[in-house]
Image (spheres, rainbow, N blue to C red):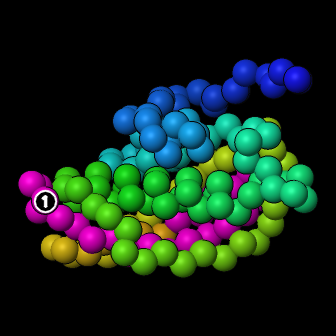
Amino acid sequence: MSQEAPPQIPPGYKLMLPNDGFMQNNGPYYLRRIGEGGYEYGFQSDARHRNPNNVLHGGALLGFLDTVMGHFAASSAKRPTATIGFDSRFLASAQPGSWIEGRVAMRRLARTLAFVDGEASANGALLVTASGIFRVFESGH
Protein backbone atom coordinates (compact mmCIF):
# COMPACT_ATOMS: atom_id res chain seq x y z
CA MET A 1 0.00 0.00 0.00
CA SER A 2 1.53 3.33 -1.03
CA GLN A 3 1.59 6.22 1.38
CA GLU A 4 0.33 9.56 0.17
CA ALA A 5 2.11 12.79 1.01
CA PRO A 6 0.45 14.83 3.76
CA PRO A 7 -1.85 17.55 2.44
CA GLN A 8 -0.25 20.86 1.55
CA ILE A 9 -2.84 23.33 2.78
CA PRO A 10 -2.20 26.86 1.43
CA PRO A 11 -1.58 29.62 3.99
CA GLY A 12 -4.59 31.13 5.72
CA TYR A 13 -6.94 28.16 5.30
CA LYS A 14 -8.65 26.75 8.40
CA LEU A 15 -10.57 23.52 8.80
CA MET A 16 -14.25 24.02 7.94
CA LEU A 17 -16.43 22.93 10.83
CA PRO A 18 -18.26 20.79 11.54
CA ASN A 19 -15.95 18.25 9.93
CA ASP A 20 -17.97 15.07 10.16
CA GLY A 21 -20.21 12.85 8.05
CA PHE A 22 -19.93 13.43 4.33
CA MET A 23 -17.57 16.38 4.76
CA GLN A 24 -15.10 14.16 6.60
CA ASN A 25 -15.40 11.37 4.04
CA ASN A 26 -15.06 13.57 0.94
CA GLY A 27 -12.80 16.22 2.52
CA PRO A 28 -11.83 17.53 4.87
CA TYR A 29 -12.78 20.95 3.52
CA TYR A 30 -11.01 24.19 4.39
CA LEU A 31 -11.91 27.86 4.16
CA ARG A 32 -10.27 31.23 4.49
CA ARG A 33 -11.93 34.58 4.84
CA ILE A 34 -11.58 37.10 2.02
CA GLY A 35 -13.06 40.54 2.35
CA GLU A 36 -16.19 41.27 4.34
CA GLY A 37 -18.29 38.10 4.57
CA GLY A 38 -16.51 36.31 1.73
CA TYR A 39 -14.63 33.01 1.68
CA GLU A 40 -12.39 30.90 -0.47
CA TYR A 41 -12.75 27.17 0.03
CA GLY A 42 -10.51 24.22 -0.72
CA PHE A 43 -9.71 20.58 -0.26
CA GLN A 44 -6.73 18.36 -0.93
CA SER A 45 -7.81 15.68 -3.38
CA ASP A 46 -6.26 12.22 -3.23
CA ALA A 47 -6.72 8.71 -4.64
CA ARG A 48 -10.16 8.42 -2.94
CA HIS A 49 -11.45 11.06 -5.36
CA ARG A 50 -10.41 9.44 -8.66
CA ASN A 51 -12.69 7.84 -11.20
CA PRO A 52 -11.91 4.88 -13.51
CA ASN A 53 -10.22 7.32 -15.94
CA ASN A 54 -7.71 8.27 -13.21
CA VAL A 55 -8.93 11.86 -12.94
CA LEU A 56 -11.01 13.46 -10.21
CA HIS A 57 -14.54 12.10 -10.06
CA GLY A 58 -17.19 14.70 -10.86
CA GLY A 59 -19.16 13.63 -7.79
CA ALA A 60 -16.27 14.63 -5.51
CA LEU A 61 -16.22 18.09 -7.08
CA LEU A 62 -20.02 18.49 -6.99
CA GLY A 63 -20.17 17.35 -3.36
CA PHE A 64 -17.55 19.95 -2.50
CA LEU A 65 -19.33 22.74 -4.38
CA ASP A 66 -22.75 21.89 -2.96
CA THR A 67 -21.30 21.96 0.55
CA VAL A 68 -19.39 25.23 0.22
CA MET A 69 -22.19 26.99 -1.65
CA GLY A 70 -24.59 25.91 1.09
CA HIS A 71 -22.15 27.13 3.73
CA PHE A 72 -21.94 30.50 2.01
CA ALA A 73 -25.73 30.75 1.72
CA ALA A 74 -26.18 29.95 5.42
CA SER A 75 -23.37 32.30 6.43
CA SER A 76 -24.84 35.12 4.36
CA ALA A 77 -28.42 34.55 5.57
CA LYS A 78 -27.26 33.85 9.16
CA ARG A 79 -29.79 31.00 9.13
CA PRO A 80 -29.78 27.29 8.18
CA THR A 81 -30.14 26.38 4.50
CA ALA A 82 -30.69 23.28 2.35
CA THR A 83 -30.11 22.69 -1.35
CA ILE A 84 -33.28 22.61 -3.44
CA GLY A 85 -31.74 22.99 -6.90
CA PHE A 86 -28.25 22.50 -8.30
CA ASP A 87 -26.97 22.83 -11.88
CA SER A 88 -23.38 22.20 -13.01
CA ARG A 89 -21.14 22.34 -16.06
CA PHE A 90 -17.86 20.39 -16.30
CA LEU A 91 -15.11 22.17 -18.20
CA ALA A 92 -11.84 20.34 -17.46
CA SER A 93 -10.35 17.53 -15.40
CA ALA A 94 -7.66 17.38 -12.73
CA GLN A 95 -5.40 14.72 -11.30
CA PRO A 96 -5.87 13.25 -7.83
CA GLY A 97 -3.47 15.02 -5.49
CA SER A 98 -4.45 18.47 -6.78
CA TRP A 99 -5.48 21.19 -4.35
CA ILE A 100 -9.06 22.06 -5.32
CA GLU A 101 -10.12 25.66 -4.77
CA GLY A 102 -13.71 26.84 -4.63
CA ARG A 103 -15.11 30.34 -5.06
CA VAL A 104 -18.70 31.36 -4.51
CA ALA A 105 -20.85 34.43 -5.12
CA MET A 106 -24.32 35.37 -3.97
CA ARG A 107 -26.55 36.16 -6.93
CA ARG A 108 -29.58 36.98 -4.79
CA LEU A 109 -30.58 36.51 -1.17
CA ALA A 110 -34.30 36.67 -0.40
CA ARG A 111 -36.17 35.87 2.82
CA THR A 112 -36.65 32.16 2.02
CA LEU A 113 -34.30 31.54 -0.95
CA ALA A 114 -30.62 32.09 -1.74
CA PHE A 115 -29.28 31.93 -5.31
CA VAL A 116 -25.56 31.11 -5.28
CA ASP A 117 -22.99 30.62 -8.05
CA GLY A 118 -19.82 28.61 -7.55
CA GLU A 119 -16.78 27.30 -9.33
CA ALA A 120 -13.99 24.85 -8.59
CA SER A 121 -10.50 25.04 -10.05
CA ALA A 122 -7.13 23.31 -9.77
CA ASN A 123 -3.73 24.66 -10.75
CA GLY A 124 -5.36 27.70 -12.37
CA ALA A 125 -7.71 25.63 -14.56
CA LEU A 126 -11.46 26.05 -14.15
CA LEU A 127 -12.91 22.54 -13.63
CA VAL A 128 -16.62 23.05 -13.00
CA THR A 129 -19.13 25.86 -12.58
CA ALA A 130 -22.40 25.53 -10.70
CA SER A 131 -25.55 27.43 -9.75
CA GLY A 132 -27.59 26.53 -6.72
CA ILE A 133 -30.86 27.48 -5.10
CA PHE A 134 -30.95 27.08 -1.34
CA ARG A 135 -33.98 27.16 0.95
CA VAL A 136 -33.38 29.58 3.84
CA PHE A 137 -35.07 28.34 7.02
CA GLU A 138 -36.20 30.15 10.10
CA SER A 139 -33.57 29.80 12.83
CA GLY A 140 -35.34 26.96 14.62
CA HIS A 141 -36.44 24.92 11.57
Q: Is residue 37 above or below residue 135?
A: above
Q: Quadrant of the N terminus?
A: top right
The image shows residue 64 at horizontal and vertical percentages of: 56, 53
The image shows residue 132 at horizontal and vertical percentages of: 44, 73
The image shows residue 117 at horizontal and vertical percentages of: 48, 70
- Badge 1 amino acid: His
Name the residue: 17% across, 64% down: 137
Name the residue: 52% across, 29% down: 12
Name the residue: 73% across, 42% down: 48
Is there any visible trace of residue 74 in the rendered image?
yes
The image shows residue 85 at horizontal and vertical percentages of: 42, 78
Q: Which residue is mark 1?
A: 141
Q: Nearer the viewer, residue 114 or 103?
A: 114
In the displayed structure image, the side of residue 31 where residue 111 appears, left or right: left
Q: Which residues are magenta?
A: 118-141
Q: Nearer the viewer, residue 83 or 123?
A: 83
Q: Quadrant of the C terminus?
A: bottom left
Disc 1: CA contacts within 10 A as few (<14), some (14-19) or many (>=20) = few
Is there any visible trace of residue 76 in the rendered image?
no
In the displayed structure image, the side of residue 102 where residue 56 appears, left or right: right
Residue 113 position by quadrant: bottom left
In the displayed structure image, the side of residue 130 where residue 84 appears, left or right: left
Q: Nearer the viewer, residue 117 or 57?
A: 57
Q: Residue furthest front?
A: 1
Number of marks: 1
Q: Name the secondary structure under disc 1.
A: loop
Q: Is 128 inside the magenta-drawn segment?
A: yes
Q: Majority secondary structure of the magenta segment?
A: strand
In the displayed structure image, the side of residue 18 where residue 28 appears, left or right: right
